[in-house]
Image (cartoon, rainbow, N blue to C red):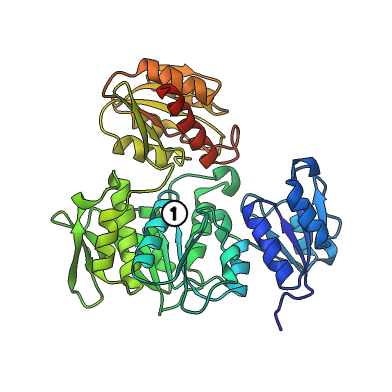
Amino acid sequence: MNQLENKRILVVGMGESGIAATQALLKLGAIVSVYDRKEEREIDTQLIQFLRNKNVTCYFDKEPNNVGELDMVVISPGVPLDTGFVRKAQDAGAEVIGEIEIAYRIGKGKYVAITGTNGKTTTTTLVGQIFKNSGRKTYVVGNVGVAVISKALQTSESDWLVTETSSFQLETTRYFKPEVSALLNITPDHLDRHKTMEKYAEAKAMIYKNQDESQYFIVNYDDEISWKLAKNCKAKVIPFSRKADLDLGCFVLDGDIVIRDETGKCIDICNVDELKIPGYHNLENALAATAISYFAGISPEVIANTLRSFEGVEHRLEFVGEVDGVRFINDSKGTNPDASIKAINAVQGNIILIAGGYDKGSDYKEFINSFQGKVKHLILLGKTAPRIKETAESMGFTNITMVKCMEESVKISHKIAEPGDTVLLSPACASWDMYSNFEQRGGHFKNCVKDLEK
């Protein structure tokens, strides 16, 4: 008998993962209710009709009144665990978990789980492509935009789910146990939610919590916080490094990406210059993907061929076009200062930088310090614009223009830029003050650039 049949479950948040969780739970015979802070008129009418046809109790823009009766709460990543009614449900005995945990329990298949402050989407997409090229049936899921639970009921024991996992998703796991886990890096982010770096790191470390000695944990040797977390891991720890020669793991040797395996044998993969994705941070992503894939049993040849052909992901250092000799690059996925610092370092030549957005409690001093004469002009929009402007001016950078919208930022950047310059959208902030997500923001930027070409 399936363990969720007739269980009273509240799904919190009607975004993509919440909708997918609701559909899967209904298939399994659960008694489902749903909550979203939006008003009913803001919810898709087809979704409302589907929920009503399935006799789902809906709480839109009002606190659920059934928390004392619940067996389980499935909470979307964007909803804090200390939300009042969620705490009430937990105090009344309900289990509070996330969509990834539910997917792990109800589905089959083997998991690769990838986390880190930056590089998750690129690394997850690259690993997924390597696995697919090896002939394995593979689903690329998680924070990349495909709910894990939407694929979980389709999987068989031999399938692989290559999963991008955020700190928000990991903190609601309980039994989740990937075959291979990976921690790419930890830099300040989401401190509005986690409050401290220690709490943020603890959430990331949940990725290996349930692993055992038969499984692998891939970790960035060059990142001090990540490497320290590895000491508590029971799985086989496999480091990767851009800077060091390792006794075990994946690293760079004489310009080549190499693996040193558990026997001490050194295996060449490919030359660093063969990668099509630019920047030191993308080299780190490639090293992580190589280690994940090799220790998951994929041949060096398949890994090398995929590395040579992989061109990156949308909204991450994505070349949009060239107008009047000025290059436009979309890095809307740069949602924190460290991500944008990496983008600035990866772009060659002078930069007109478009930044600003939702405030996640970040500090912008290192971000401004990274300009190093490369950033000629800073164009700011969104809620954090005044804070970033104040920080920049206190550090002596005054070539700043404040704007109200993306259209204005693109037009002004085009006027300021000279042939050979690059206009880089890398906000160093989340998108939620002006857009639903970073994809929408990046798409708007690309459309504004297209309008310049007309």
Q: How far across and how far down the image is residue 394, in percent?
A: 43, 21
The answer to whether one can see residue 361 in this image is: yes
Q: Residue at x 28, y 66 (%)?
A: 302
Residue closer to the observer: 308 or 115: 308
Residue, disc 1 = 116
Q: Residue furthest left?
A: 254
Q: How far across and how far down the image is residue 34, in percent?
A: 77, 56
Q: Residue at x 72, y 51 (%)?
A: 83
Residue 345, quarter of picture? top left
Q: How far across and how far down the image is residue 77, in percent?
A: 61, 53
Q: How far across and how far down the image is residue 354, in percent?
A: 44, 27
Q: At label 1, which amino acid type do we have?
A: Gly
Q: In this image, 260 relative to 345: left or right? A: left
Q: Residue at x 82, y 60 (%)?
A: 53
Tell me the element at label 1: loop
For the C terminus, the image quarter is top left
Density class for disc 1 (Cα within 10 Å; few <14, some 14-19, many ≥20) is: many
